[in-house]
Amino acid sequence: MSESRFYHISPKGKLSGVATVDAALAAAKDGDFLWLDYCQPTKEELSRLIDPLGLHPLSIEDCLDANQIPKIEDFPRNTFIIFNTFEYLNKKLSVGEIDLFIGVNFLITVSKPNSENRRLLDGIEHIVERDIENAWHGPAFLMHVILDYVVDRKFLAIEALEDELETREEAMLADVSNFIPAELLQSRRDLLSLRKSLFHEREILIKICRKDCPFIPEKAIFHYRDIYDHLTKFFELTESYRDLVSSLMEMYLSMLNNQMTKAANETNIVVRRLTLITTIFMPLTLLAGIGGMSEWSMMTGPHNWRIAYPAFLLAIGVIGFINYCLLKWFEKRRR
């Protein structure tokens, strides 16, 4: 059996809980309107409402299927709406689903537990009680209170994602070599999910504000316009954050390229120094190799070694200095 709660709201604005669906249906016949709040219901539980409230079997299937996109569908006795919830916990975005059926004298909400195994609408009855002055006017006003609560919680997730982007930007600027670009790609995927959901939810509110839903009276439209404004603002925020992620990725690649260029320049400087040293000592090595075989003492005579070897060392020093000067002169000419 699912964790479900059933209420009826009297014309005087009193929210009362009842134990069973039958009790809630009986209260609705007496002039009250009912609110059935289901959490992870079974197909049998929702199918019981097909005859008394006119729920369509396809809508019930949508309630039980996961990963449905937000939408609004009109039926003869009710309107079916799918809305998403956002939660950003432990650097992970969780997208939940709230299903709503609104009729002349009833509102049905269907949800599933979130990632922490809590009700998505946990504590919503207290929100309704605090705002009972609006809720008791009818199901459309009650649905506005619930959707307003859901939309306000979306901003918490978007704000947490913004803080995470700022943290990743600071980490990248502090040490680009240890920065993990996969985190930016994850943020980009999260923002795409938010944008997709907000786009469809905004379309739902456009239809409601256009008075396409027969179960939402004109005097309630003004409340839904406020929700539409919030969704439009959130949609624009996700667009700006997507641009920010793209800019951060470009900045990361640019900083990484600068680091690689700096390392390459340092390597070039070292290679140039080694090349200079090698070029200077190549002829000296040749002369030292010849002199190391005692050729100089053989040409000058063994008894003249005291003169031959110092002269040989002096010649090596002079030749090395001349090579150095020639290399510097050629380098200046190239500039």
Image (tube, rainbow, N blue to C red):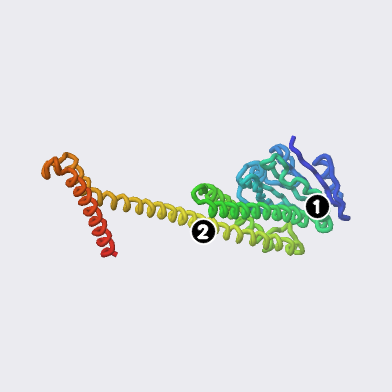
Q: Name the residue under label 2.
A: 247
Q: Can residue 238 be seen in this view?
A: yes
Q: Can residue 286 be seen in this view?
A: no
| Mark 2: amino acid | Ser
Q: Residue furthest top?
A: 1
Residue 272 percent coordinates (x, y)? 31, 53
Residue 132 percent coordinates (x, y)? 83, 55
Q: Is residue 313 above or below residue 230?
A: above
Q: Mark 1 points at which residue?
A: 128
Quick one: SS at disc 2? helix
| Residue located at (39% from left, 53% from top) | 266
| Residue located at (19% from left, 49% from top) | 311
Residue 102 percent coordinates (x, y)? 73, 52
Q: In this view, does 149 lie above or below 304?
A: below
| Residue located at (65% from left, 59% from top) | 231
Residue 252 percent coordinates (x, y)? 49, 54
Q: Quadrant of the C terminus?
A: bottom left
State the residue in front, 180 or 175.
175
